[in-house]
Amino acid sequence: MRAMATPRPESETLNIQLLVDSIPALIHTSRPDGYLDYFNKPWLEYLGATLEQVSGWNWTAFIHPEDVEGIVATWRASLASGEVFEYETRVRSANGNFRWMLHRKVPLRDERGNIVKWYGSSLDIEERKTAEEQLRRSEMELRLILDLAPQLIAVYGPNRERLYANRTALDYLGIGLDEWRHKSFAASAHPDDSERFKTYTDSALSSGAADELELRLRKRDGSYRWFLARLNPLRDEQEQITRWYFTATDIEDRKQTEDTLRRENVALREEIDKTSMFEEIVGGSPALRIVLSRISKVAPSDSTVLITGETGTGKELVARAIHRRSNRASRAFVSVNCAAIPRDLIASELFGHEKGAFTGATQQRLGRFELANGGTIFLDEVGDLPAETQIALLRVLQEHEFERIGGTRRIHADVRVIAATNRDLQAAISAGSFRSDLFYRLNVFPIEIPPLRERGEDIPLLVEYFIDRYARKAGKRITTVDKKTLRLLESYPWPGNIRELQNVIERSVIVCETENFSVDESWLSQQPSHGKAESQLYLSEKVAAQEKEIIEAALRESQGRVFGPSGAAAKLGIARSTLESKIRSLKINKNRFRAITGT
């Protein structure tokens, strides 16, 4: 602003003075040295003071004590630099109250650029300051709520700009806000979850749709906890995304509870019947001692075991015995009956699935291999696995990793595999229904369970064991076993093996009304027949010689081969395990038939 050279007439000056005193504005002027030499009438009325009382530097007495130092320093700086002055202070009015004012002074310069006058105005901004204060308090309260919320909260811009993270998140990660702006949550994700987290954020941000994910995030001390992460967009009136809001809720306790329920209640107990025979192995026959010896040898290792034997011989009992004597005894034992699960669901049951992997997959589900992590998985009736599942199982055995159905992330499998079957897998391989490479992976340490008919010495012990169990359960006292009944039980071939014996004993205890135990002969599904030995699956001891002759003839014809389409078992129409047990019991040397063929 430049000074005018020509002075105004006195009448014009009076008119200007009247105008300045009449307008509803607080006007003041200052000399070049900062001495305030004029306040208009509205100013003096507001202050309730005379010009003499506020002129010079006396005006500072009307400024709020907390604001005096700041306005004086800023005013002196403007005087020194010649820059426009602007400052906000609280000013005391005539009634003693303070109101916020915005003060602004502009310099007037002469032709040489020297300041000859300062002209200033003060604007009442009390309402604005009140509104700002209310807004500030609201923001502080909101920020306090966010900072104290038991969630990790972050705000991103439309292009993933990191704008804000609450105190809970920063404390959890152990970093400051500036550092977080250069380090996202993805960098703190568990290595097994980081790829899923990246896919999750990329998918949500590209589609513009809300999404959620469970993942583990690293805490400041290096430990990991499970969180449920949610990403939600905020859109403007044009449906353009202006913000992304990220929240992560701690679900560690829930996950631990779920794992406990799954591992202990589901995995460990869902197929364990405490009232069944599968609590301990009973017997001391030579055939059983061989099995117990093999269990003791293989249990401490992590080797894969293949248990074979007829239905009802107690294959799961042996698998549990191996697990209990292993280094994994404190971890889960997960049992899966491969024949009892529909073919289209067996892969999902074993390996789990991701949300949306197929119709009905409404949420992520862990498979049995994940539930057995660190422990043992028992695959009963493994011979009934469909071809595509056999391939997936082979990969687990070879590479110790798998993928959930619908997933892309490889999951490490720290699981010992014990498989069992009553099928002739060699015959299944020849028929093309079972993979030979999978068989060799499973058959690292084979254990064959003898049928009950080969454990005659164990039948009295088993009878006593089951009578004691079911008598106590029924609240009955049984002290003796009818001798005729015991002979009947010892001579019966037990095609259903121990499971059939168990059922017969339980039924007999229920109907027993005395202390002497007996069994109704009609309850036994088969009776030994001496007249049709050659047509029966199980031959009596009286035709052992004929049985031996038949088996040797079949071995001779099959050149000593026991299993397979051209093996002796197939020619005789009996299971491989049955034929093997007969060969042992009849002391047949099958190798000599191979030697004859070679000659």
Image (tube, rainbow, N blue to C red):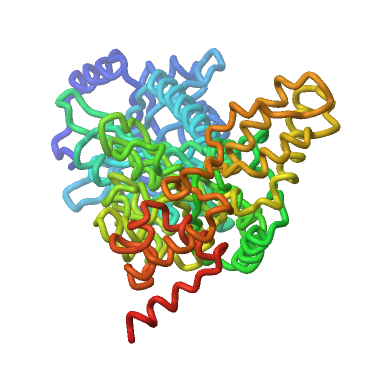
Horizontally, is 453 left or right of 355 in the view? Answer: right
Q: Quadrant of residue 442?
A: bottom left
Residue lying at 38% horizontally and 16% vertically, measured from the top left: 42
Residue lying at 48% horizontally and 55% vertically, measured from the top left: 578
Q: Is residue 547 above or below residue 526?
A: below
Q: Name the spot of residue 510 as percent of width and height, x first.
A: 70, 22
Q: Name the spot of residue 566 as percent of width and height, x first.
A: 29, 63
Q: Is residue 346 visible?
A: yes
Q: Quadrant of the N terminus?
A: top left
Q: Quadrant of the C terminus?
A: bottom left
- 320 and 479: which is toward the camera: 479
Q: Is residue 417 above or below residue 28?
A: below
Horizontally, is 456 left or right of 367 in the view? Answer: right
**Total numbered circles:** 0
Horizontally, is 486 left or right of 256 in the view? Answer: right
Q: Is residue 166 above or below residue 132?
A: below
